[in-house]
Image (spheres, helix red, strand yellow):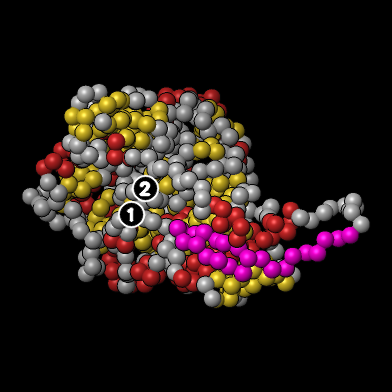
Amino acid sequence: AKKTKCLRSRSVCGASGVHVKMADEAVCVGPAPTNKSYLNMDAIMDAIRKTGSQAVHPGYGFLSENKEFAKRLAAEDVVFIGPDTHAIHAMGDKIESKLLAKAANVNVIPGFDGVVEATRVILCSGGGGKGMRIAWNDDETREGFRLSSQEAASSFGDDRLLIEKFVDNPRHIEIQVLADKHGNALWLNERECSIQRRNQKVVEEAPSTFLDPETRRAMGEQAVQLAKAVHYSSAGTVEFLVDSNKNFYFLEMNTRLQVEHPITECITGLDLVQQMIRVAKGFPLLHKQEDIPINGWAIESRVYAEDPYKSFGLPSIGRLSQYQEPINLPKVRVDSGIQEGSDISIYYDPMISKLVTYGATRAEALQRMEAALDNYVIRGVTHNIPLLREIITHPRFISGDITTNFLPEEYPEGFKGHQLTSEGRRELVSTAAALYVSAQLRSQRFLGNLRVSTTPQEQRQWELCVELEKGSHTVAVSRSGSTFTVEVDGVTVEVSGEWNLASALLPVTINRTPRVLQCLSRDAGGDITLQYLGTQFKVRVLSQLVSTLSAHMPEKVPEDTSSILRSPMPGSVVAVSVKPGDVVAEGQEICVIEAMKMQNSLIAAKAAKVKSVHCKAGETVGEGDLLVQLE
């Protein structure tokens, strides 16, 4: 058999990426900004000519749904591993796709061509939830139009917008389709994608807990009808909004491989990338519709370099100082393009990886996801594992009672991390105390030959003070081997483990319940940061004497944040709307920051006069940088 050589385009910024190292050859197509590299068709076509490439797989984003790119490949007799230009154009334009869907007898959102109470502004090109905004009044419509237009032009080079009726409290369920060039088309079951933030998916699963076999079949058949109507050939995804009565409405068709495709592979046993290559080569499909199974359950968590405490996830940048994927666990799959030492930059999507778990049942898949998140080590950037773990262990999610409004409904004041119960608080306090004592014992241990003639008596009991979330606990600790017995608030807690202080993971057993914590930081002053049940907690462990003396230390006065505007994320300044001396109203836009292809409008916290402006359009800013100061 002839060996297929794998080539990979890269930007200057992506030179050390895992995808580059896995390829047989890599070609630089330009500097880090996407419009000068991954969206630069001239540079990519030049790389194709130089390497003599015969086919191109476009991946998930960038030019994957760009009909002009597909045309240019076809003109040079290079195979585009995806659908033809007609299907890309028909489904890529959201206005035309609605009309085609309607003509193919596919359910479309009712009333999208009439006057509605609320509207949703959507980009006519592109996808991934970019540029989607809800407008409840004229002012929000004007603002949404402006920001969405800018995002559309920046991300896809097309600033046209579609306005349609907003369906409240829907589920987002999509159907995976696969079609060949011989008129055959299959639907490969559904993916539940309702857990979203800013219209972008966070957790997906296959199959959906909501669909019955009849609704699944109806959605699948309509998806295939649409694929056949546009003579589709390749893997594609038809997305639907589904209401509480199981009425479903066509949303869009993505004419590419989806980020979440691994969960479909898990439950069907099909390799979708392999199928795309076979179809592009001209082979017919190997399977019939009756051959497509639902075997088990798969869940995907999108692990992002984001701060989940800011609008459920604002981008974070930095270098991965420590990175360890939980691939040692059974039925765990991690698709990532980074490794320890990689940089997360402002130029690309902040996704670190797709974490997938599979089980015979949903409960088993969820249990494995919980363990995988606990064993996932990510240091150097802020990440969204705290949010992911809270979602998959939330009673409402476990019951399957979810909609696209899950996050704002369950966390109306924003995500605050795991909320400790009294039992959880005792577990955390006890583990911190045991860890502190283990470190103290290690520091007292002599290695090699002793210089003293007698060995000091090893201490076996400790009286400590543990501070956690503005609360203080007096604890008594005793040790027997690797097991610590901790008295907290009159309750005895037993904590045992290996207490390997050099390991990134801290596996312990607390009252016979196995837990995996992570010690993120620890200093000589007793300050310890532990990741417990996904969330980071700052704990201070002190001896009784030090605790008494620390009460006399002065407290740092917090900064008055109402008079200053700092950047909530790293990014570039798109626009500054004020100058020194201007009077601004509460809620008035001050500036717009773009980070990882999303634009964010920053507003004034109070009515005041602008004292100084510390940024200008085009500048790059870091998280926490001072932008504007008010009087």
Location of residue 485 in the rendering, given as x and y in whole percent from the top left corner? 64, 72
Residue linked to disc 2: 310
The residue identified by callout 1 is: 414
Is residue 102 positioned above or below 558 on the image?
below
Instruction: Give left or right: position of 255 versus 43.
Output: left
Q: Please name whichever residue, 55 or 470, is drawn nearer the observer in this view of the structure.
A: 470
| Most common secondary structure along the magenta stretch | strand
Q: Which residues are magenta?
A: 454-476
> Which kind of residue does numbered mark 2 sit on?
Lys
Comes first in the chain, label 1 or label 2: 2
Q: CA distance from mark 1 to mark 2?
A: 7 Å
Displayed quadrant of residue 38: top left
Viewer-closest of 150 and 96: 150
Left or right: where does residue 117 sit relative to residue 53?
Answer: left
Q: Is residue 69 visible?
A: no
Whether pointer 1 and pointer 2 mark residues with C-beta atoms closer than 8 Å, the reply is yes
